[in-house]
Amino acid sequence: MLNFETTLQDSKTYGDLTLSEVEPILKINLRSNKREFSTKIGKLLSILPPIEANTSSSNEDYSILWLSPDEWLIYSNNKISYEQQNLLEENLFNNISNINQGSVTNVTDHWIMINLKGSKIYDLLSKSSPYDFKNFKIKKGSVAQTLLNHTDVILHNIGDNNLNLFVRRSFSEDLWLWINDSARFL
Amino acid sequence: MFIIICPYCGERDQTEFSSGGEAHIVRPKQPTELSDDEWAEFLFMRKNIKGIQFERWNHSHGCRKWFNVVRDTSNDKIHAVYKMGEKPPINK
């Protein structure tokens, strides 16, 4: 059953492959097609939303993933307190949503982030994803939205054989079980 | 199964997309003045030809954007992909 606090508490290792859920970090969805939006985000977070498709930009604290020409996902690289989360959300809301520059939605509890590490992660993903990982795996910062075992996922390449996978909360338990099951046969 | 080049994300497998049917069907400007037959024609009647067809597709498991595709229904060959609002690169 769905546990409101956290769905997956495990961290599993299969040979060279390590899977772990990353504690609820801040995730914010941004939508805008206004020109000033980019500079606003730059001022607020000292990071610009990427314009090029399937890419991301990061600084020490946050990463911004390209989801569509007018949609981005911000997530914090480290766990931050609820007070800080609320402060940032409020700040973005007041500077963007409130003046009709776009929309800001806190999706922290909507997405579950799983970190996959190890030389066999792409073998694992290729078992049930139609996506071609050829270019994705060589370019750090690549982003892909695709299907994994018929479930929508967002993948973010954060280094050599190291990626973050975002899955919707209600699908996360199922996908976690599938990943663990498949990882045994690599 | 075939590959579609999403105008926003690039080359992706067909399973990530959903088809939205025939493209370039213009909504009548005065729907109230239409007869039932004309309204039904606009709402329900679609071409189902063997050959080159203009279609709408949605990248539902990716960027969630709509776009147009020119596809040969007999062999699933895609002749062109273009964004919403753009003119078809191939004559209709």
Image (tube, rainbow, N blue to C red):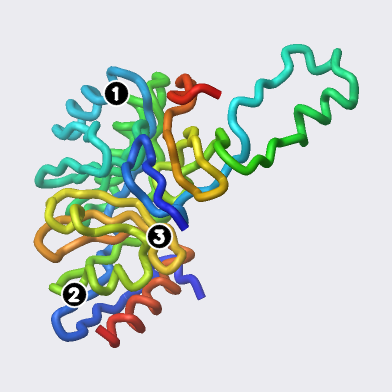
Report whether mark 1 lies on the same chain as mark 3. yes
Residue A120's disc number: 2
Of the pair B61 and A112, the residue shown nearer to us? B61
Report whether mark 2 lies on the same chain as mark 3. yes
Of the pair B75 and A12, the residue shown nearer to us? B75
> Sequence order check: which comes first, mark 1 or mark 3?
1
State the SS at label 2: loop
Picture coordinates of residue A113, whole percent (x, y): 30, 61
Q: Residues within 10 Å of mark 3 (few under 14, many from 20)?
A: many
Is residue A149 shown above or below B23?
A: below
Residue placed under numbered mark 3 in the picture: A147
Separation of marks 1 and 2 at Cα, in angstroms: 39 Å
Report whether mark 1 lies on the same chain as mark 2. yes
- Disc 1 vs disc 2: which is toward the camera? 2
Residue type (three-letter) at the residue carrying disc 1: Phe
State the SS at label 3: strand
Residue placed under numbered mark 1 in the picture: A37
Of the pair A126 and A1, the residue shown nearer to us? A126
Q: Chain of mark 3?
A: A
> Sequence order check: which comes first, mark 1 or mark 2?
1
Separation of marks 1 and 3 at Cα, in angstroms: 30 Å
Whether residue A55 is visible here, answered yes or no, is yes
Residue B41 placement: quadrant: top right
Residue A46 placement: quadrant: top left
